Image (cartoon, grey):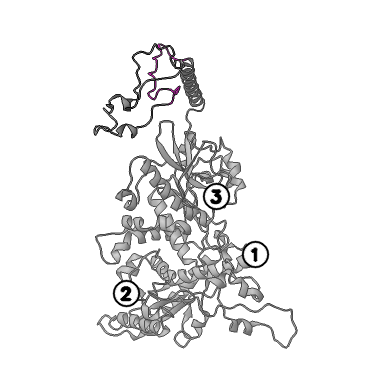
Amino acid sequence: MPPTLDLSQSTHAKMIVSPPRLNLRRAASYQHEKAPLSATSSRFSFNHLMFDPPPSPGLPALVPRPRKLSTGPRPSRVARVIAWVTGLALVVFIFRAALQKNGRVPVVGWVLDNHEDYEMVGQYDLPDFPTPIAVTDRNGRSKWTVSIPPTSAFPLTTKEYSDMCVKCREVAAHVRELHGYTNPAQQTQTDYYYVDPYFLDVSDAEKRGLLPGVEGKAWKVTAQAQDGHLVGDDANGLVDKSTCKTSLTFILESADAGLGPTLMKLWMAYGLAQKEKRSFFIDDSRWAYGDYTAIFKAPPMPDCNPPPRHEMLPCPRNARHLVVSAATASETFGESFNAEYENRHRKNVERERPIYDLARVGYEALFRLNDEDQPYVENRVKELRAMAKVPEGNHNDGMIIGVHIRHGDVHPYEYQYNGAYVPLNLYLQRSKELVEEVHNSSTPLGGEDLVAKQHSFAVVASDDPDVYETEEFSGSLRAQEQIKLASKQHIQKANQDKSVMHKFVDESFGWEGGFFASMFWNLGRSTLNNANAADEIQPTLRPSAETMRLRGLIGRAYVMDLAVLGRASDAVICTMSAMGCRLIAVIMGWEKAMEEGKWVNIDGDFQWTALSL
């Protein structure tokens, strides 16, 4: 039997003392484990070996100690609060001081060319180019106006006027959105005389300090420095008259070489100005045909002076001083204009009567030829009337059938002739039909008036000089012979004898085929480089004095043709595709042209309209 260890007699002379920092506490995993009764007992378990060992001596406790509550605020927090309060008070003080000094600090934004969002800048950061801008006062109320630097040249370019009209719509829509109107109202799109409540006119914006303006009467010096030329405006009379309250200025400049569309817009603009009780002015500073007074007499001048040029705006329609040009025609004479002035209750040509009346007012006031051409036209009309007069004892005078033939770069509306021109035999056939309709039964007993038929004849006006030599109209009369457009063939016949040496003359320039825009823009230029010149933008080139002289002659010939046909003819045959045809209807008068049916269109089944925009 092995010896046993007897501890009962031990005196504990020797003891093992643990170091003071040694933690002898049992781990939690051992506190509830029962020891085995014997080495061979079935109750023995190895679970105590599966738990983590006790924590290492000297490590901090796993549970953080509770934080002690402070009894007062820390000095750093108090300092931050004081700094914030002081800074806020300083900002408020500076802001109020600025308001008291300037009265208001508006915010200004303008439309960018790439249609980006509005850039908001300070009051004195106005753009140095013409553009509509949105402004906001100190109360957050948004308005919009148009900023044109007073030193800008007048008139603006056609592109600037066209772009500004687009930007006006964008800015107006933006300001409506700021006021909570996300969708444009139907009224703003269709009402021609809709007044935008958020628009500020230039003079009003200057009074409120939103635009710098021109103080005192300094604008007179600025106006003289600009290149604009208002027809009939006397610069020496600025002091004697007050500035017009409202006005409409028509800019004659146009990218269209034709004179007809410009004349129709001019007449309508004058009639519109009279209806709206606006003073009317004409600017011819960059007109392709030269000085207005070289073709027409100066228009009637109002009893007031034109406004500062930077107050003349192309948009909106309710602007106090409005500018109208070919570039803004769609704004002034577009869909809303037709909706306002067309007679919706009529389906025939009576629908256009209000617009026709506007053009007629402009014709009566403005279509006064210069001192050289007006007497000629009057004498020519008397001469033609005398030729149609029958001897005494006969019943009716002969008919004068005016025929207006437009070739060149204008083609008919009718589909079958759209790529060419209306055949000349159709003009001749229709003119014979008109004479027969009147004089087949014009005698007192209802019989045919042969004498009146014999004294009836056609008067022709055309942009194509070869028309007068055709079989159909070789025996007809020209509307006027004061200024003729000749072909190369006629020019070469009129030249000196080629066998005689003479000074070299550049290649002759003729009008075969009619009026073409490219030919017009190249008038007075050398024909040696016309191949390259055709690719250039002709309206942008500065014309020479000889070029302007030639253009003026073409304009004078055109208006004299219209005047003679419209005033001397008993009936006129023309094509609606030509603007001259529509102008002749205005010259003839509504009763004669429309009610009596003496204005005859042979270009499809179209009724008279003023413009095709």
Q: Earlier in the sequence, mark 2 or mark 3?
A: 3
What mark, if any, has residue 233 been given in the picture?
Answer: 3
| Image quadrant assignment for residue 351 | bottom left
Q: Secondary structure at mark 2?
A: loop
Q: Earlier in the sequence, mark 3 or mark 1?
A: 3
The residue that mark 1 highlights is: 545
The residue that mark 2 highlights is: 605
- Residue type pointed to by label 2: Asp
Q: Residue at x 61, y 75 (%)?
A: 531
Image coordinates of residue 487 in percent, x first then y, are 57, 80
Disc 1: CA contacts within 10 A as few (<14), some (14-19) or many (>=20): few
Disc 2: CA contacts within 10 A as few (<14), some (14-19) or many (>=20): few
Closer to the eye: label 2 or 3: 2
Report the quarter where the C terminus lies. bottom left
Q: Residue at x 38, y 30 (%)?
A: 53
Q: Which residues are magenta?
A: 56-74
Closer to the eye: label 3 or 1: 1
| Image quadrant assignment for residue 384 | bottom left
